[in-house]
Structure formats: C-alpha cells, structure tokens
Image (cartoon, rainbow, N blue to C red):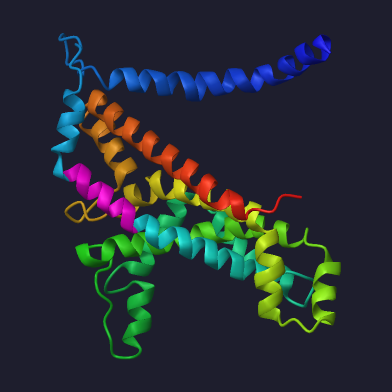
Amino acid sequence: MRRETIHAWLMLLPALVVLAAFMHIPAIETIIASFWSTARGMRPSHFVGLKNYERMIADPTFWQAMSNNLIYAIITVPLSMGLALVMALLVQGKRGGTAFMRMAFFTPTVLPLIAVANIWIFFYTPGFGLIDQVMNLFGLHAPNFLGTGATALYAVAAVAVWKEAGFFMIFYLAALQTIPTSLIEAAQLEGATRWQIFRRITLPLIMPTTLFISVNSVIDAVRLVDHIFQMTQGGPNNATSILFYYIYQVGFQFWDTAYAATLTVVMIVILSVLAIGQVLLLDRKVHYK
C-alpha cells in the first residue's frame, strides 16, 4: 500500500510543481507585495501595511470598474450559458444540416481574440460599419456603440457572448449525449411533453456540466482584457473599464506594481468567493452518476 501511495504522489508531482510554480507561489508573492510600496528608480520599496488597501477603498476608478464588472457579468454569464444550451439542443442528433450548424456555432470560439475584436469594431463603426449599413436600408442611423458611455459596455458584452456561447455549447452537447435514451423513451410512453422531458430529465442530468460552465463563465467575466484593450481601451471615460483591465492599466501602463498587486488580491478573493458560492449553491441540485 505504501508503495502504491508513493507511486501515486510521484505521478502527481509534475502537475503539483506546475501548480505551485505558476499559481500558488505567485499568488503568495502577490499578497505579500500588496503590503509594500512600489520601487521607484533608486528608491527601494518599503513596508506600508494596509495603505494600498486604504487607497483602493478611496479610489473612484476602482469602484467604477467593479460596477462595470458586475453589470458585464450579469449580462454575459446567463446569456452565454442560455444561448449555449439552446444551440446544443438544436445541433443534437443527426438531422440534416446539423454538422454545418455545429461548425457555424463553434467557429467564433476558434477565432483569435484580437481578430474577433477587429471584426466587431467593423460592425460597430458608425458611418460605414455593417450595422450602420443595414440600418441605412431602413432610413435609420446606428449610434456610436463603442464611443458612447451608455452603450459601450453592452457592445463589448455582446462580443463576449457571441464568442463564448459556442465554446460552452461543446460541453452541453457532450452532456446531452450522455443522457440515456431509455429515460426519454419511457417519459414519452407516459405522455410527457417535450418541456416536461427537458425540465424533469434533461436539465437535472446536465447539472454537473452547468455547474462547471457557470464557474468558468464567471471567471471569464472577471478576467476579460483582450476585447477591451483592442476595442475601447477602457473608455469612453472608463465606461468599459472592468477590474482585470484596470489591473493591467495600473501594473503595466502606470507601473504601480504594488497597487496592482492589491487589486489582484481583491480579484482573487472575489473569484474564490464566487466559485465556492456557486459550488455550495448548485451542488445540491447536481446529480452525479
């Protein structure tokens, strides 16, 4: 038994080393760095205690980024998950055209993030963008989606939903194909409607996948930076600046690494609380096989 235990730990060792080197140790160093100041030129960093956290609490840009992030998550998480499930239900089975639909739904996922951002910049551009051209056919003019504070965040959220839904669809499709057909056939013999089958059989049996997707979609909603960097640069007037992009700005544009570490610690805490909360909330509804 001891030999098997040693063998198991040796098999796990490479993964544990990678996790420690690229996740756990950097996380600990980030927490430590949040209690120190940023080194400037010949001036070394020094211990400042909770001053970085006090600065964060008094920072209006931080609170705006948090507010934007909350709105962005409320939009993208349910929409991307719901759309992914609908698409998976549409392409399930071997009906005609299913292969083409799967390819069409999944294509946005394989496109590079920068390419996706540039495609949607063309869609949104006022005057000659695709949306404006279509609206001109009806005598209408599209607003400046990315240049107006009232619409910019929603425009970026639409891009994220369009790209992520196809990725989540693959997981839902795999989950749907594991449902025994005997259960559905038995329900149909009992006179169950399609909605009843979906609610009483399909939805409960894909809950493990739903839990997995929900945790990942929340993480994606917090760590977005590529689309915002390419499409809006956080503007106009910080209307699309969310937490992770603000961390990027502070750390790599303003070069205030200590304050960026403080913001990163807050982001890690938020993600941990959300992930644990989702697991505790949804785990009772999960039916594991």
The front one of 32 and 284 is 284
The part of the image, by quadrant, that contains residue 157 is bottom left
Where is residue 175? Give x, y as percent. Answer: 71, 57
Say if the magenta span includes residue 64.
yes
**Position of 135 relative to 54 (above/below):** below
Can residue 71 be seen here? The reply is yes
Q: Quadrant of the N terminus?
A: top right
Can residue 90 be seen here? The reply is no
What residue do we see at 23% from left, 28% from top?
259
Where is residue 93? Give x, y as percent. Answer: 78, 70
The part of the image, by quadrant, that contains residue 101 is bottom right
Where is residue 25? Give x, y as percent. Answer: 46, 18
Q: Does 108 sit left or right of 2 as displayed?
A: left
What residue do we see at 35% from left, 80% from top?
133
The front one of 27 and 210 is 210
Q: Residue furthest front?
A: 284
What residue do we see at 72% from left, 67% from top?
201
Say if the magenta span includes residue 5.
no
Q: Does 275 sit left or right of 229 as displayed?
A: right
Q: How many marks?
A: 0
Q: Does 29 sit left or right of 113 as displayed?
A: left
The front one of 182 and 158 is 182
**Position of 267 relative to 241 (above/below):** above
The front one of 60 and 156 is 60
Q: Is the magenta region chiefly helix, strand or loop?
A: helix
The part of the image, by quadrant, that contains residue 170 is bottom right
Residue interval drawn in magenta: 61-71
Where is residue 219? Give x, y as percent. Answer: 46, 45
**Position of 144 relative to 72 (above/below):** below
**Position of 205 relative to 277 (above/below):** below
Q: Does 162 sit left or right of 184 as displayed?
A: left
